[in-house]
Image (cartoon, helix red, strand yellow):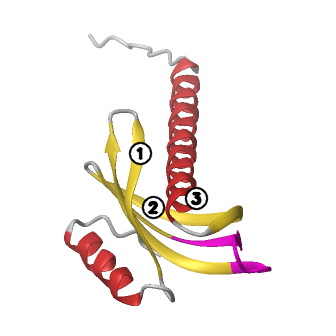
Amino acid sequence: MAKIVKFTFDNNDEENLTQDSKESQNQTLDEREAIRKALEDHILANFAVKTILGIDFVYKINKNDIGVLGQIAYEHKRRPGVFVADYIAKGYKQKDRYVIDSLAFQLGEPEFYTQILNILKAKKALPDV
């Protein structure tokens, strides 16, 4: 004789999945904000930028290496007006924060820009655009 076995499924699994996806979204938002802060700190410390008006970027993390491609709108320290520039940056993750160690503007430093681009390709940390 055969027995009929009923399986009861709870909706708790679906709730747990949505909770996990929300946590991963929060983690990526925190990660993105940490990278944004590292970029802003590096730009303000090393370039003649008075105020960053807007910054847009895409990034890719491979192990501890970070590759960033983006565009920035800023006010220059010595020249009046608003400027927009494309840039590339590379950095690394240090414990719980991100550090940008090289950044180059496409029109200002084309050789350095190409050098960073090649390094990111070799480390497989170049973001897909």
Magenta segment range? Answer: 70-83
Disc number placed over residue 33 in the picture, else none: none
User: Which sits earlier in the primary sequence, circle 3 or circle 1?
Assistant: 3
106, above or below 26, in the image: below
Rendered residue at 67%/79% (across/down): 84
Rendered residue at 54%/71% (across/down): 70
Q: Quadrant of the N terminus?
A: top left
Disc number placed over residue 98 in the picture, else none: 1
Quarter of the image where one finds residue 68: bottom left
Q: Report the residue marked by disc 2.
A: 59
Rendered residue at 57%/36% (across/down): 26
Q: Which amino acid does label 2 sit on?
A: Tyr
Q: Which amino acid does label 3 sit on?
A: Leu
Q: Report the residue marked by disc 3.
A: 44
Q: Residue 111: image x %, image y %?
A: 34, 88
**Does dot 1 land on a helix, a strand or a loop?**
strand
**Does dot 2 land on a helix, a strand or a loop?**
strand
Callout 1 touching callout 2 (CB < 8 Å): no
- Name, please, the residue furthest toward the front: 78
Foreground disc of the pair 1, 2:
1
Instruction: Rate crowding at label 3 as few (under 14), some (14 to 19) or many (20 or more) other CA atoms within 10 Å.
Output: few
Quarter of the image where one finds residue 90: bottom left
Q: Residue 4: image x %, image y %?
A: 38, 14
User: Which sits earlier in the primary sequence, circle 1 or circle 2?
Assistant: 2
**Towards the viewer: 60 or 51:** 51
**Does dot 3 land on a helix, a strand or a loop?**
helix
Q: Residue 8: image x %, image y %?
A: 49, 15
